[in-house]
Image (cartoon, rainbow, N blue to C red):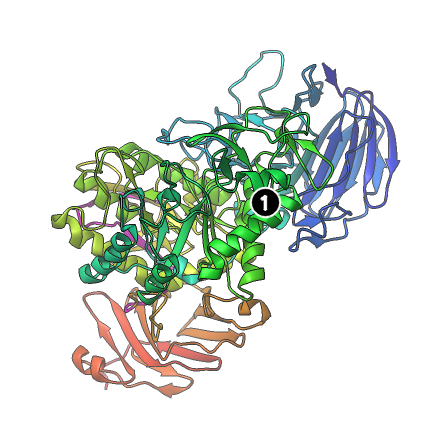
């Protein structure tokens, strides 16, 4: 056991400082005022900087040329003061105290409040097996969020969490650990000080977090991170808001890639169709026709791997089964004509019987065994397989060639990467690692990221200018900058429906804003009618909305599977489509700020202690609280409405004060939703297909009782032209004083498709007395039918306490002024 106990030397560097202890070396960068890097090695020298993960660095890195979205910053000067017992480094927001003996690092804010404290005499450790440990003190008032894709409640205190990608079909969403993603990052929130901090361990070896499960009376209460190898390379982030920590973390690992707009539509899927003996193409086309006949919008189909099945019944990536799909290109074109994108399932493991196995093997494109002489084989779906090595330029190039020939040249630019956890059981198997060779034990969770990176490059090469839509089941920190993810092969149960919510919320706090789960449950018997309806009502708020199944009772989960419930399913999916402009704007925000789309209550209301343990109610963006029904047979739903604002029932417009718990009656059609005061929510009421429809009438739901703003984002939804300025952001700002002024400020070259704006202003006390557009008075109507027939004007809906305002969209900046003066009818 080697423990850093004593600082023996301090060596100033170029915008960093090196520390030498009795057994280890440290390098500290002050990345900026809020982010600090602490790098620790027990070897003689630091390893070469070589990261597939970081998008912000302050040093040269071997992967710089490969990582196109990497940004080089200049670290702050690492000037230190020697205070006798410790060294002190400063930023404007932080103080770093390096204790000399026993060696430990503490971090405080500028006022001296402790934010992070190493466990002294046990802070940085390497054991005889080569495992690395970092011990931190913890307080009773600490809450821990994030950790990527993890089961259970949102707060992970008193949990032991393993970082390891694994195929966990039918998992228990409350207890199973690990799942598919490996994201060694967490947020610590200290209740009394309202301070949020983050720790990201830049280490892709298998690892674990112990968040207070272990206890010893000889030490203060502690948590620890343990990795099987590599370095203790950690980044500390200080908020003080949780949303600040998420922003800083995604500065380091990348923002969520802006997806195609059609990916926000309903994406059909099931394993059932592609496992038919023949004519799977007709089954999928019939599904699309049935959607249209049922009035259910649908914009795409995730095609399960049965389409690749060979004559021996095994799945072979890049192989089209022509009994099931006689003419793939014609099928893809037919899907496109129906307004649907196709996302085929792709797997990185190639069975030894695969027709292409030899060509990949001879090219050296697979991960090798420990000798480096032969391709490594391991257990896979269908038998022994070898796995494409995406750290090898040869593997990436060959994969791209087949991806292009089999799909992209046929018009497919949506790729579904599946079964990519790389469960290779030989830790000494060798990856090429850009020619340097490295054991897979050090790189395994990075391979799904690189697989997605390769697909993105293939689309850029073969379909220039086309925006990729990639989906990945596995991933490491940074997967968000390539792909949408989902929570794998969940089980079909009420329990899974409920606990998939905090699984998704934890991913959002871990930088992955664009994700969801299989709606209806993937593995198990068909969901009962009530469960299916509730799952759809929940799923419409997830960025990835796909009903997907592999039912164990010879059934298929479809929107119309229970005709008596189809109206409720249809109503929910249509609500999803109404919300598309809001979703798309939130995903644009995620691509710029890193913000989650589905947000835990504590993210928006960390000042309210009642939100700190909330796992199931969530915010959709800033403006909408969703309290789905998650219990079987529920007749009421208890909802806590956070303090600091007012809340308005989405359906009834009934107003509630914040800081209270209410109980609402619910029925099978109920989707409990509450509008936050200051809300600005853009809606598309007539949208039925994102591919084919243009949003010509935009509705704006605005609650104007407090000042607020929202950025509405528009572009063509399918190309990369937005990167060159072909987009439109409209900052909608509400200022409430004597009158309410709603201003619209525009930026970008994209010509909006919106021809007419319909605003619903949710009024608090009184109706308006007048509405003006750019200083011009809009006509007021008493009869709503006459308002409907008019081109512009407004009327007051007394039942919904809302002013309805409509007008022709303006191409330039403009203002709408709503006068709430009380009109004195008597004195007149």
**Where does residue 473 sit, x and y in percent of width and height?**
46, 41
Closest to the observer, 535 or 804: 535
Q: Secondary structure at mark 1?
A: helix
**Where does residue 809 sit, x and y in percent of width and height?**
39, 80
Residue 427 visible? The answer is yes
**Where does residue 277 sit, x and y in percent of width and height?**
27, 43
Left or right of 604? Residue 461 is right
Circle 1 residues within 10 Å: few <14, some 14–19, many ≥20? many
Left or right of 818? Residue 229 is right
Q: Is residue 336 above or below residue 361?
A: below
Q: Residue at x 29, y 84 (%)?
A: 792
Closest to the observer, 422 or 240: 422
User: Which residue bears the numbered disc 1?
Assistant: 450
Residue stretch rendered in magenta on the structure: 659-686
How many tags in the picture?
Answer: 1
Which image quadrant: the C terminus? bottom left
Q: Is residue 660 magenta?
A: yes
Which image quadrant: the N terminus? top right
Q: Residue at x 44, y 76 (%)?
A: 752
Q: Is residue 328 above or below residue 790?
A: above
Q: Is residue 64 above or below residue 786?
A: above
């Amino acid at each position: 056991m080697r423990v850093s106990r004593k600082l023996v030397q301090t060596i100033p560097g170029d915008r960093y400082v090196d520390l030498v202890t009795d057994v280890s070396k440290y390098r500290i960068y002050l990345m900026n005022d809020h982010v600090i890097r602490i790098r620790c090695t027990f070897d003689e020298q630091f390893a070469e900087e070589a990261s597939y993960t970081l998008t912000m660095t302050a040093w040269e890195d071997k992967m710089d040329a490969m990582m196109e979205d990497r940004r080089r910053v200049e670290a702050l000067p690492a000037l230190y003061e020697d205070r006798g017992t410790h060294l002190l480094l400063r930023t404007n927001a932080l103080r770093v105290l390096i204790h000399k003996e026993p060696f430990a690092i503490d971090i405080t804010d500028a006022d001296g409040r402790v934010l992070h404290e190493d466990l002294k005499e046990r802070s940085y450790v390497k054991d005889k097996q080569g495992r690395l440990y970092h011990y931190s003190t913890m307080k009773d008032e600490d809450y821990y969020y994030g950790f990527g894709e993890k089961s259970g409640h949102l707060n992970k205190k008193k949990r032991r969490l393993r970082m390891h990608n694994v195929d966990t079909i039918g998992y228990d969403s409350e207890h199973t650990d690990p799942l598919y993603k490996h994201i060694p990052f967490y947020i610590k929130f200290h209740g009394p000080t309202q301070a949020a901090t983050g720790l990201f361990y830049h280490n892709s070896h298998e690892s674990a977090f112990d968040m207070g499960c272990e206890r010893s009376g000889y030490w203060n209460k502690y948590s620890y991170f343990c990795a099987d190898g590599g370095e203790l390379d950690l980044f500390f982030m200080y908020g003080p808001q949780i949303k600040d920590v998420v922003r800083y973390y995604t500065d380091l690992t990348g923002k969520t890639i802006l997806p195609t707009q059609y990916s926000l539509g309903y994406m059909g899927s099931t394993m059932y169709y592609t496992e038919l003996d023949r004519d799977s193409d007709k089954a999928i086309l019939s599904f699309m026709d049935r959607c249209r006949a049922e009035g259910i919008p649908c914009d795409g189909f995730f095609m399960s791997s049965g389409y690749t099945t060979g004559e021996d019944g095994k799945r072979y990536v890049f192989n089209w089964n022509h009994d099931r799909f006689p003419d793939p290109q014609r099928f893809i074109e037919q899907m496109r004509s129906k307004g649907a994108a196709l996302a085929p399932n792709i797997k990185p493991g190639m069975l030894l019987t695969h027709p292409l196995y030899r060509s990949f093997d001879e090219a050296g494109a697979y991960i090798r065994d420990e000798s480096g002489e032969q391709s490594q084989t391991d257990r896979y779906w269908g038998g022994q397989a070898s796995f494409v090595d995406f750290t090898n330029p040869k593997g990436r190039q060959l994969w791209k060639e087949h991806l292009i020939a089999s799909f992209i040249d046929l018009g497919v630019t949506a790729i579904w990467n599946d079964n990519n956890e790389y469960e290779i059981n030989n830790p000494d198997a060798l990856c090429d690692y850009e020619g340097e060779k490295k054991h897979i034990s050090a790189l395994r969770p990075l391979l799904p990221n690189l697989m997605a990176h390769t697909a993105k490059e293939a689309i850029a090469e073969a379909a220039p200018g086309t925006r990729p839509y990639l989906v990945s089941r596995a991933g490491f920190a940074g997967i968000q900058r390539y792909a949408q993810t989902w929570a794998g092969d969940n089980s079909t149960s009420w329990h899974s429906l409920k606990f998939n919510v905090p699984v998704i919320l934890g991913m959002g706090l871990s930088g992955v804003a664009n994700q969801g789960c299989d709606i209806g449950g993937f593995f198990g018997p068909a969901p009962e009618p009530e469960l299916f309806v509730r799952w759809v009502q929940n799923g419409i708020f997830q960025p990835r909305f796909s009903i997907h199944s592999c039912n164990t009772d010879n059934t298929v989960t479809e929107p119309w599977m229970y005709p008596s419930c189809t109206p409720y399913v249809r109503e929910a999916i249509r609500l999803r489509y109404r919300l598309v402009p809001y979703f798309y704007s939130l995903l644009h925000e995620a691509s710029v700020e890193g913000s989650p789309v589905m947000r835990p209550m504590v993210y928006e209301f960390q000042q309210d202690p009642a939100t700190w343990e909330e796992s199931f109610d969530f915010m959709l963006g800033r403006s909408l609280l969703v309290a789905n029904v998650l219990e079987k047979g529920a007749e009421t739903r208890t909802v806590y409405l956070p303090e600091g604002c007012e809340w308005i029932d989405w359906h009834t417009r009934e107003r509630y004060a914040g800081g209270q718990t209410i109980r609402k009656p619910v029925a099978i059609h109920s989707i409990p939703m509450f509008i936050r005061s200051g809300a600005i929510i853009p809606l598309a009421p007539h949208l039925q297909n994102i591919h084919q429809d243009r949003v010509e009438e935009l509705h704006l739901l605005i609650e104007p009782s407090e000042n607020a703003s929202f950025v509405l984002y528009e572009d063509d939804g399918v190309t990369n032209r937005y990167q060159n300025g072909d987009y439109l952001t409209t900052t909608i700002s509400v200022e409430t004083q004597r009158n309410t002024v709603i201003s619209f400020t525009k930026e970008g070259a994209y010509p909006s498709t919106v021809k007419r704006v319909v605003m619903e202003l949710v009024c608090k006390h009184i109706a308006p007395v007048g509405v003006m557009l750019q200083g011009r008075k809009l006509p007021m109507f008493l009869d709503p039918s006459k308002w409907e027939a008019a081109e512009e004007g407004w009327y007051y809906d007394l039942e919904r306490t809302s002013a309805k305002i409509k007008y022709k969209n303006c191409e330039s900046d403009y203002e709408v002024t709503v006068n709430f003066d009380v009109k004195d009818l008597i004195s007149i």
